[in-house]
Image: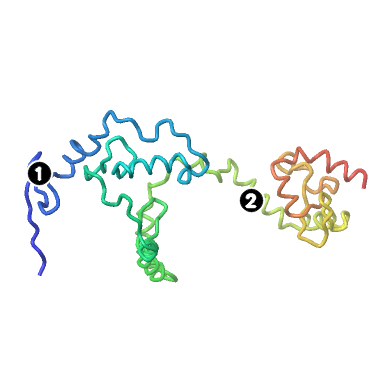
Amino acid sequence: MARKAKYGKCTDCGTPVNRGSQQLCRGCFFKNHAGKHLIGATPWNKGVILGRFPKQSSRMKEIWAKAKAEGKSFPSNTGTHPLLGKPSKQIGRTRTLEARLKMSEARKRFLQTETGKMVHAANTQKAIQANMGAIFSPERCEKIRQSKVGKRRPDIAGEKNWNWREDRNAVLEKHRVRGSLEWKQWRAAVFARDDFTCKECGVRGVYIEPHHIIPVRSDWNKLFELNNGITLCRPCHKRTMWKEDEFAGKYTALLTTA
Protein backbone atom coordinates (compact mmCIF):
# COMPACT_ATOMS: atom_id res chain seq x y z
CA MET A 1 0.00 0.00 0.00
CA ALA A 2 1.44 3.36 -1.03
CA ARG A 3 2.21 5.80 1.71
CA LYS A 4 0.03 8.88 1.65
CA ALA A 5 2.03 12.08 1.34
CA LYS A 6 1.62 14.70 4.05
CA TYR A 7 1.21 18.10 2.49
CA GLY A 8 1.63 21.42 4.17
CA LYS A 9 2.15 25.03 3.20
CA CYS A 10 5.31 27.00 2.50
CA THR A 11 6.20 29.08 5.54
CA ASP A 12 6.88 32.09 3.30
CA CYS A 13 4.25 32.16 0.56
CA GLY A 14 1.78 29.44 1.55
CA THR A 15 2.29 27.25 -1.52
CA PRO A 16 1.46 23.53 -0.84
CA VAL A 17 4.64 21.52 -0.21
CA ASN A 18 5.51 18.05 1.02
CA ARG A 19 5.87 18.59 4.76
CA GLY A 20 7.76 15.34 5.10
CA SER A 21 10.88 16.86 3.62
CA GLN A 22 10.21 20.54 2.90
CA GLN A 23 9.25 23.68 4.74
CA LEU A 24 9.76 26.09 1.84
CA CYS A 25 8.69 25.90 -1.78
CA ARG A 26 11.43 25.84 -4.41
CA GLY A 27 10.94 29.48 -5.42
CA CYS A 28 11.14 30.85 -1.87
CA PHE A 29 14.13 28.69 -1.02
CA PHE A 30 16.27 29.95 -3.90
CA LYS A 31 14.92 33.49 -3.61
CA ASN A 32 15.43 34.09 0.10
CA HIS A 33 17.79 31.46 1.47
CA ALA A 34 20.10 29.73 -1.04
CA GLY A 35 23.48 31.43 -1.15
CA LYS A 36 22.41 34.13 1.33
CA HIS A 37 25.27 33.25 3.67
CA LEU A 38 27.80 33.86 0.87
CA ILE A 39 26.88 37.54 0.33
CA GLY A 40 29.95 39.68 1.04
CA ALA A 41 32.16 36.65 1.73
CA THR A 42 35.68 36.44 0.28
CA PRO A 43 36.10 33.62 -2.26
CA TRP A 44 38.02 30.74 -0.72
CA ASN A 45 40.44 30.51 -3.66
CA LYS A 46 41.13 34.24 -4.07
CA GLY A 47 44.83 34.86 -4.65
CA VAL A 48 45.67 31.14 -4.80
CA ILE A 49 48.03 30.23 -7.65
CA LEU A 50 47.73 26.58 -8.58
CA GLY A 51 50.11 24.44 -10.58
CA ARG A 52 49.50 22.23 -13.60
CA PHE A 53 47.56 19.70 -11.50
CA PRO A 54 45.30 21.75 -9.16
CA LYS A 55 43.94 18.79 -7.17
CA GLN A 56 47.48 17.61 -6.39
CA SER A 57 48.78 21.11 -5.59
CA SER A 58 50.36 21.45 -2.13
CA ARG A 59 48.57 24.77 -1.64
CA MET A 60 45.21 23.18 -2.47
CA LYS A 61 45.86 20.34 -0.04
CA GLU A 62 46.66 22.85 2.71
CA ILE A 63 43.40 24.71 2.10
CA TRP A 64 41.29 21.56 2.26
CA ALA A 65 43.16 20.23 5.29
CA LYS A 66 42.52 23.48 7.15
CA ALA A 67 38.84 23.41 6.21
CA LYS A 68 38.40 19.83 7.47
CA ALA A 69 40.24 20.65 10.70
CA GLU A 70 37.78 23.50 11.31
CA GLY A 71 34.79 21.25 10.61
CA LYS A 72 33.93 22.79 7.25
CA SER A 73 32.47 20.90 4.31
CA PHE A 74 33.94 23.38 1.85
CA PRO A 75 36.91 25.77 2.14
CA SER A 76 34.75 28.90 2.41
CA ASN A 77 34.47 31.49 5.16
CA THR A 78 31.16 30.15 6.47
CA GLY A 79 32.01 26.48 6.94
CA THR A 80 28.44 25.49 6.03
CA HIS A 81 26.93 23.50 3.21
CA PRO A 82 25.32 25.85 0.63
CA LEU A 83 21.94 24.07 0.84
CA LEU A 84 21.95 22.35 4.24
CA GLY A 85 23.08 25.43 6.14
CA LYS A 86 25.28 23.28 8.41
CA PRO A 87 28.53 21.30 8.15
CA SER A 88 28.25 18.20 5.99
CA LYS A 89 28.55 14.73 7.53
CA GLN A 90 30.84 13.69 4.66
CA ILE A 91 33.85 15.57 6.12
CA GLY A 92 36.76 13.20 6.60
CA ARG A 93 34.76 10.19 5.40
CA THR A 94 36.80 7.62 3.48
CA ARG A 95 34.85 5.14 1.39
CA THR A 96 36.00 1.57 1.06
CA LEU A 97 37.24 0.16 -2.23
CA GLU A 98 34.07 -1.93 -2.52
CA ALA A 99 31.88 1.15 -2.14
CA ARG A 100 33.86 3.08 -4.72
CA LEU A 101 33.59 0.21 -7.20
CA LYS A 102 29.82 0.10 -6.70
CA MET A 103 29.59 3.85 -7.35
CA SER A 104 31.69 3.45 -10.48
CA GLU A 105 29.49 0.64 -11.81
CA ALA A 106 26.36 2.69 -11.08
CA ARG A 107 27.66 5.60 -13.16
CA LYS A 108 28.43 3.30 -16.10
CA ARG A 109 24.72 2.65 -16.53
CA PHE A 110 24.26 6.19 -17.81
CA LEU A 111 25.50 8.02 -20.88
CA GLN A 112 25.84 11.75 -21.44
CA THR A 113 24.42 13.04 -24.71
CA GLU A 114 25.78 15.95 -26.73
CA THR A 115 23.29 18.26 -25.03
CA GLY A 116 24.53 17.20 -21.58
CA LYS A 117 21.48 15.09 -20.76
CA MET A 118 22.10 11.85 -18.85
CA VAL A 119 20.28 8.85 -20.33
CA HIS A 120 20.20 5.20 -19.32
CA ALA A 121 22.66 3.22 -21.43
CA ALA A 122 20.56 0.04 -21.51
CA ASN A 123 17.45 1.88 -22.73
CA THR A 124 19.50 3.69 -25.36
CA GLN A 125 20.89 0.42 -26.71
CA LYS A 126 17.37 -1.07 -26.77
CA ALA A 127 16.14 1.88 -28.82
CA ILE A 128 19.06 1.54 -31.23
CA GLN A 129 18.47 -2.20 -31.66
CA ALA A 130 14.74 -1.66 -32.12
CA ASN A 131 15.25 0.85 -34.96
CA MET A 132 18.21 -0.92 -36.59
CA GLY A 133 17.26 -2.01 -40.09
CA ALA A 134 13.75 -0.65 -39.73
CA ILE A 135 11.98 0.45 -42.92
CA PHE A 136 9.70 3.41 -42.27
CA SER A 137 6.48 3.84 -44.17
CA PRO A 138 6.14 6.80 -46.58
CA GLU A 139 3.67 8.39 -44.18
CA ARG A 140 6.13 8.24 -41.29
CA CYS A 141 8.98 9.53 -43.46
CA GLU A 142 6.83 12.48 -44.48
CA LYS A 143 5.92 13.12 -40.84
CA ILE A 144 9.62 13.16 -39.88
CA ARG A 145 10.41 15.48 -42.78
CA GLN A 146 7.63 17.89 -41.83
CA SER A 147 8.90 17.98 -38.23
CA LYS A 148 12.25 19.30 -39.49
CA VAL A 149 10.89 21.87 -41.93
CA GLY A 150 11.68 25.42 -40.87
CA LYS A 151 14.15 24.37 -38.19
CA ARG A 152 17.36 25.28 -40.03
CA ARG A 153 20.20 26.61 -37.95
CA PRO A 154 20.88 30.15 -39.18
CA ASP A 155 24.40 30.13 -37.74
CA ILE A 156 25.52 27.37 -40.15
CA ALA A 157 23.01 27.78 -42.98
CA GLY A 158 23.64 29.20 -46.44
CA GLU A 159 26.88 31.10 -46.90
CA LYS A 160 27.89 30.46 -43.28
CA ASN A 161 28.11 26.71 -43.88
CA TRP A 162 31.61 25.21 -44.11
CA ASN A 163 30.63 23.36 -47.31
CA TRP A 164 29.18 26.41 -49.08
CA ARG A 165 30.04 26.83 -52.75
CA GLU A 166 29.22 29.92 -54.79
CA ASP A 167 29.10 27.88 -58.00
CA ARG A 168 28.28 24.19 -57.75
CA ASN A 169 29.04 23.74 -61.46
CA ALA A 170 32.78 24.06 -60.75
CA VAL A 171 32.57 21.16 -58.30
CA LEU A 172 30.64 19.02 -60.78
CA GLU A 173 33.14 19.84 -63.54
CA LYS A 174 36.03 18.78 -61.30
CA HIS A 175 34.42 15.39 -60.69
CA ARG A 176 33.72 14.99 -64.41
CA VAL A 177 37.32 15.77 -65.38
CA ARG A 178 38.80 13.31 -62.89
CA GLY A 179 36.81 10.52 -64.49
CA SER A 180 37.78 11.42 -68.04
CA LEU A 181 40.27 9.67 -70.33
CA GLU A 182 42.45 12.81 -70.58
CA TRP A 183 42.93 12.84 -66.81
CA LYS A 184 43.94 9.16 -66.70
CA GLN A 185 46.43 9.62 -69.53
CA TRP A 186 47.98 12.73 -67.92
CA ARG A 187 48.19 10.95 -64.56
CA ALA A 188 49.93 7.90 -66.09
CA ALA A 189 52.39 10.14 -67.99
CA VAL A 190 53.38 12.00 -64.80
CA PHE A 191 53.95 8.73 -62.93
CA ALA A 192 56.01 7.21 -65.75
CA ARG A 193 58.21 10.29 -66.08
CA ASP A 194 58.95 10.30 -62.29
CA ASP A 195 59.49 6.51 -62.25
CA PHE A 196 56.55 6.07 -59.81
CA THR A 197 58.63 7.70 -57.05
CA CYS A 198 57.66 10.53 -54.69
CA LYS A 199 59.79 13.52 -55.72
CA GLU A 200 59.59 15.01 -52.22
CA CYS A 201 60.77 12.16 -49.96
CA GLY A 202 61.98 9.62 -52.56
CA VAL A 203 59.79 6.76 -51.34
CA ARG A 204 58.70 4.12 -53.84
CA GLY A 205 56.15 1.31 -53.77
CA VAL A 206 53.48 3.28 -51.84
CA TYR A 207 50.26 5.00 -52.83
CA ILE A 208 51.15 8.00 -55.02
CA GLU A 209 49.17 10.92 -56.41
CA PRO A 210 49.74 13.51 -59.16
CA HIS A 211 50.14 17.05 -57.85
CA HIS A 212 49.49 20.23 -59.83
CA ILE A 213 52.37 22.63 -59.22
CA ILE A 214 50.08 25.52 -60.22
CA PRO A 215 46.68 24.55 -58.84
CA VAL A 216 43.72 24.15 -61.15
CA ARG A 217 41.72 26.78 -59.24
CA SER A 218 44.38 29.34 -60.24
CA ASP A 219 44.81 28.36 -63.89
CA TRP A 220 42.39 25.89 -65.46
CA ASN A 221 44.33 25.92 -68.76
CA LYS A 222 47.27 24.06 -67.15
CA LEU A 223 45.13 21.13 -66.07
CA PHE A 224 46.71 18.60 -68.45
CA GLU A 225 50.19 20.11 -68.90
CA LEU A 226 52.85 17.49 -68.23
CA ASN A 227 55.31 20.02 -66.78
CA ASN A 228 52.64 21.21 -64.32
CA GLY A 229 52.40 17.78 -62.67
CA ILE A 230 54.71 16.02 -60.21
CA THR A 231 54.46 12.70 -58.34
CA LEU A 232 53.97 12.81 -54.56
CA CYS A 233 53.05 10.23 -51.94
CA ARG A 234 49.89 10.83 -49.95
CA PRO A 235 51.54 12.33 -46.81
CA CYS A 236 53.67 14.72 -48.87
CA HIS A 237 50.69 15.67 -51.02
CA LYS A 238 48.59 16.52 -47.96
CA ARG A 239 51.26 18.95 -46.76
CA THR A 240 50.94 20.95 -50.00
CA MET A 241 47.16 21.41 -49.92
CA TRP A 242 46.25 25.13 -49.97
CA LYS A 243 49.99 25.87 -49.77
CA GLU A 244 50.84 25.28 -53.44
CA ASP A 245 52.56 28.65 -53.81
CA GLU A 246 55.12 27.73 -51.14
CA PHE A 247 56.19 24.59 -53.03
CA ALA A 248 55.81 25.82 -56.63
CA GLY A 249 59.39 27.09 -57.00
CA LYS A 250 60.93 23.98 -55.45
CA TYR A 251 58.97 21.51 -57.61
CA THR A 252 59.60 23.52 -60.78
CA ALA A 253 63.33 23.38 -60.08
CA LEU A 254 63.16 19.61 -59.48
CA LEU A 255 61.59 19.05 -62.89
CA THR A 256 64.08 21.38 -64.59
CA THR A 257 67.13 19.58 -63.17
CA ALA A 258 65.73 16.10 -63.74
**Helix, strand, or loop for circle 1?**
loop
Looking at the image, residue 197 sits to the left or right of residue 120; the answer is: right
Amino acid carrying label 2: it is: Leu
Tell me where residue 217 appears, x and y as whole percent: 70, 41
Q: Residue at x 12, y 46 (%)?
A: 23
Looking at the image, residue 202 sits to the left or right of residue 88; the answer is: right
Looking at the image, residue 184 sits to the left or right of residue 166; the answer is: right
Q: Residue at x 47, y 34 (%)?
A: 49
Looking at the image, residue 217 sits to the left or right of residue 189; the answer is: left
| Near-viewer residue (232 or 43) | 43
| Near-viewer residue (216 or 201) | 201
Q: Residue at x 39, y 40 (%)?
A: 63
Q: CA distance from mark 2 to mark 1?
A: 69 Å
| Near-viewer residue (242 or 88) | 88
Quickly name the residue at label 2. 172
| Near-viewer residue (17 or 103) | 103
Tell me where residue 105 appears, x and y as whole percent: 38, 65
Quickly name the residue at label 1. 10
